[in-house]
Image (cartoon, rainbow, N blue to C red):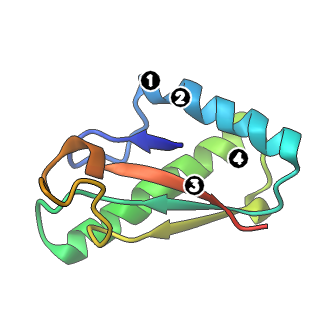
């Protein structure tokens, strides 16, 4: 599952919130101990800026989980990877590269 973002934004769009709420339910049902929230960007702009933006995206989703779903922050790890792992490497500016992905760690 992934959540997409608008260009140059870390704000969670309204149409992405149902997917996040679904993930909250899954986390509760499966008793997942730790979820890594991994922020990504497209390749527009500088690498340092994209690194920062990707971390902001991950932190925004982590904040959503804590505030909206009451998931303890100890169960969430925000990671920003910038433009390192493009989902669509054929089009580095593609919308789908601007995303947050999730990894169950334990």
- Check residue 66 in the rendering and tell me which mark sits there, or answer none: 4
Calculate the distance from the C-alpha at mark 3 to the C-alpha at mark 4: 15 Å
Q: Is mark 4 on a helix, strand or loop?
A: helix
Residue in view at x 60 percent, y 52 percent: 62
Q: Position of residue 51 (x, y in %)?
A: 31, 71
Secondary structure of residue under mark 2: helix
Nearest to N terminus: mark 3 or mark 2: 2
Identify the residue position indicated by label 2 in the image. Answer: 17
Identify the residue at horizontal 32%, vertical 61% (top origin): 53
Q: Distance between the residues labelled 1 and 3?
A: 19 Å
Alpha-carbon span between mark 1 and mark 2: 5 Å
Residue contact at pointers 4 and 2, CB within 8 angstroms: no
Q: Which of marks 3 and 2 is in front?
A: 3
Query: Residue 14, which numbered label?
Result: 1
- In three-dimensional space, the C-alpha distance between marks 1 and 4, rounded to whole angstroms, equals 17 Å
Q: How far apart are marks 3 and 2 (CA)?
A: 15 Å
Circles 3 and 2 in contact, beta carbons < 8 Å: no
Q: How crowded is mark 4: few (under 14 residues within 10 Å), some or many (20 or more)?
A: some
Quarter of the picture containing the N terminus is top right
Question: Circle 2: is it few (<14), some (14-19), or many (20+) Cα within 10 Å?
Answer: some
Q: Tell me the crowding category of disc 1: few under 14, some 14 to 19, or many 20 or more residues within 10 angstroms, Cα based.
A: few
Return the residue at label 3.
102
Q: How many callouts does the rendering have? A: 4
């Amino acid at each position: 599952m992934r959540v997409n973002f608008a260009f140059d934004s870390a704000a969670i769009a309204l149409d992405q919130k149902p997917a996040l709420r679904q993930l909250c339910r899954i986390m509760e049902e499966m008793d997942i101990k730790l979820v890594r929230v991994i922020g990504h960007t497209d390749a527009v702009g500088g690498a340092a800026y994209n690194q920062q933006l990707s971390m902001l995206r991950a932190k925004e989703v982590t904040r959503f989980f804590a505030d909206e779903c009451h998931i303890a922050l100890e169960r969430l790890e925000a990671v920003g990877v910038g433009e390192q792992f493009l989902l669509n490497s054929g089009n580095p500016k593609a919308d789908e590269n601007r995303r947050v992905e999730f990894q169950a760690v334990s």
